[in-house]
Amino acid sequence: MHRSNRDLQKKPTALSFSSNFAPVAVFAYNRPAHLQKTIDALSENALAAQSDVFIYLDGPKTENDFVANKKIQEICNGANEFKSLTLVRRDRNFGLASSITSGVTELCESHGRVIVLEDDLVTSPFFLTYMNDALDLYQNEEAVASIHGYVYPIDATLPETFFLRGADCWGWGTWKRAWDHFEPNGSLLLNKIKDLQLEDEFNFGGSSRNTEMLEDQIAGRNNSWAIRWHASAFIKSMLTLYPGRSLVKNIGNDGSGTHCPSRICYDARMLGTPMSLKRIAIVQNSQAYDEFKAFFEKLSTKAKQTRKNKTFFHVLLTKIFHRIFGRQL
């Protein structure tokens, strides 16, 4: 156990509703440089010295992973800004989905709630206060699935906080009562969505690829826990609370992650001031839904144009190759 003696006056003032602070789970694998940034940012939170942190380190698959694992253990040994830091070393490679779902289940069982980060998420100094306060505020609301810390870089001004149907995965928190609804079987989820005729809403009016992601998970083309968590909450008509301004930045969109491609379109400017958190009506916010839909449509248009450009240049380069080298064959 590592305890911090750091002067907290240099950090934001912690004004939280409860002393029952949620444990923080951080899931890591083979990116020590990213994890270091995640831990450094988390340590700058006002509630860092009052939070129990659990680093779930997945088992190595390659020799390079062994080296990365060792560096991560050194990072954990040097992290003394928290109430406690526990390194949970997997004895084999679980894979991201199994590592997260089992870790979240363990902490929900032991603590009743959890805040979840991955090793490529950098948080605002106000992240832990917002998450703990919101977990307190909505802990007994059965319709609320989770609290989310990230919001897409949408140009429009969103409400300070708002609800959307389903769940999300970049810096979030939940309770045992909600996590108990997590369904790991993607086929059951997809069939239920189709039976209830929810595909259009599930896909933000056709602007997102959620159904396709779920189909890919079922077929083994991905192993996304996040799409199953979203679908599980969505089917139950549960909602997630979002901030109008992001408290999380994903630094893993540099192509280093297991599942995230290199994209800057998700980069959000992090919140530099505290959240103004108050109870709001637990209903889906129509403005936010429309803004998310427009954002996904813009991403889809960009992706189609990128594919079109790649096809064009591939054909062009093929023609040039044959013109230059065809004569020599």
Image (tube, helix red, strand yellow):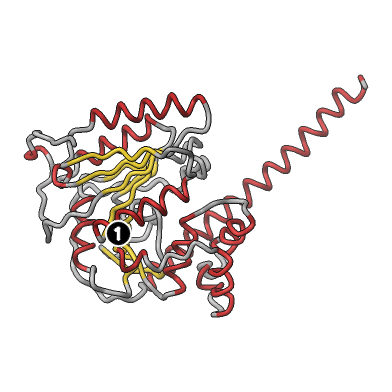
Task: Compare residues 148 and 190 and report the one nearer the observer.
Answer: 190
Say whether residue 214 is left or right of residue 101. Answer: right
Count the marks: 1
User: Residue 237 placed where, x, y %?
Assistant: 41, 75
- Residue 37, placed above or below residue 154: above
> Please, which residue is most extreme toward the bottom here?
196
User: Residue 76 placed where, x, y %?
Assistant: 28, 32
Residue pictured at 17% horizontal, 54% vertical = 21
Callout 1 crowding tier (Cα within 10 Å): few <14, some 14–19, many ≥20: some
Q: Amino acid at mark 1?
A: Glu
Q: Which residue is mark 1?
A: 109
Say whether residue 78 is left or right of residue 232. Answer: left
Quarter of the image for residue 37 reads: top left
User: Residue 80 placed where, x, y %?
Assistant: 18, 33
Residue pictured at 19% horizontal, 44% vertical = 45
Residue pictured at 38% horizontal, 30% vertical = 32
Quarter of the image for residue 169 reads: bottom left
